[in-house]
């Protein structure tokens, strides 16, 4: 069986500038996410960062990828527009999936695909987050309990300025009273998009089993589906039936 090709993209900035983040994610946030995916034999996993050639978004890598998991926060603006454009084409025309994670809500690619500000409320006081599965039949939450708690997370609160999702799969409640749509899906062209909220850089959420299960399920769901043509359909086709000229015009 062909493996699902997962590209884990991380800006990889906090890990190099903050000792606490480096201690928590010694192989980078991308390393922890890749490790979660590698627990599933269906996946072949590569990682890329801002430091990679062409920022990890070269044509060959995007041609290889079936799904891109995206973690960014402090360096969104350093991602070059031409590479964002390339990724946008891969998603919308070739059906490569995208999973923006946590602060990836403000990434250039997600904002471009959504067309809204993607803004939200946030607060960083280490409060707990309770996540509820609200679409239990969805493959993204297969094997995930109805509700689970992240002991400490950064709060993200509504309003989350996104277009109405096709599906809302996860809802969060925070100790401080805010709520948030934490797992949402959209289609854009041929591509599937799954936004997944947890994963603040200074907190260990990417080591928690429920989060890792959702990362694996999400990658399998968002991945490029078989049968999507790898080139556009083309313009100005010949008619398929004999077409009679309009008599009134002749
Ligand atoms: Zn954060």
Image: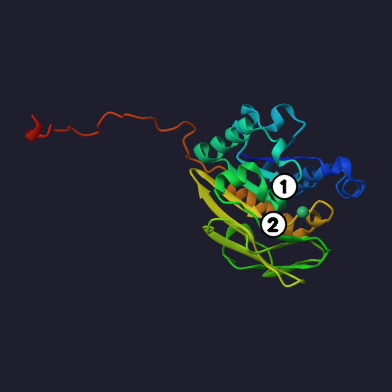
For the N terminus, the image quarter is top right
Mark 1 or 2: in front is 2
Left-right relation of 75 to 19: left
Q: Residue at x 31, y 29 (%)?
A: 237
First in sequence: mark 1 vs mark 2? 1
* Observer-nearest of 190 and 165: 165
- Say which quarter of the image contains residue 136: bottom right
Q: Is residue 247 above or below residue 139?
A: above
For the C terminus, the image quarter is top left
Q: Position of residue 53 (x, y in %)?
A: 73, 26
> For mark 1, what is the residue?
37
Colour theme: rainbow
* Observer-nearest of 189 and 213: 189
Q: Secondary structure at mark 1?
A: helix
> For mark 2, what is the residue?
197
Q: Residues within 10 Å of mark 2 (few under 14, many from 20)?
A: many
Q: Is residue 149 above or below residue 46?
A: below
Q: Position of residue 61 (x, y in %)?
A: 65, 31
Q: Position of residue 17 (x, y in %)?
A: 88, 42
Left-right relation of 229 to 197: left
Residue 172's disc number: none
- Say which quarter of the image contains residue 243: top left
- Say which quarter of the image contains residue 60: top right
């Amino acid at each position: 069986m062909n493996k699902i090709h997962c590209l884990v993209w991380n800006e990889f900035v906090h890990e190099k500038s903050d000792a606490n983040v480096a201690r928590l994610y010694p192989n980078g946030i991308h390393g922890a996410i890749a490790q979660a995916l590698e627990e599933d034999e269906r996946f072949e996993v590569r990682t890329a960062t801002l430091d990679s050639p062409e920022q990890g978004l070269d044509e060959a890598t995007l041609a290889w990828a079936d799904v891109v998991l995206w973690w960014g926060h402090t360096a969104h603006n350093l991602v070059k527009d031409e590479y964002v454009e390339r990724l946008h084409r891969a998603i919308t025309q070739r059906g490569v999936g995208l999973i923006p994670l946590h602060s990836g809500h403000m990434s250039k690619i997600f904002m471009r695909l959504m067309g809204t500000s993607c803004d939200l409320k946030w607060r960083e006081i280490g409060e707990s987050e309770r996540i509820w599965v609200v679409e239990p039949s969805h493959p993204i939450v297969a094997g995930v309990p109805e509700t689970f708690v992240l002991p400490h997370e950064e709060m993200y609160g509504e309003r989350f300025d996104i277009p109405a999702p096709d599906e809302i799969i996860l809802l969060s409640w925070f100790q401080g009273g805010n709520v948030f749509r934490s797992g949402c899906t959209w289609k854009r062209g041929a591509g599937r998009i799954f936004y997944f909220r947890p994963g603040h850089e200074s907190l260990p959420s990417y080591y928690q089993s429920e989060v890792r299960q959702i990362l694996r399920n999400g990658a399998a769901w968002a991945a490029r589906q078989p049968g999507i043509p790898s080139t556009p359909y083309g313009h100005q086709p010949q008619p398929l039936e004999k077409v009679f000229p309009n008599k009134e015009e002749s």
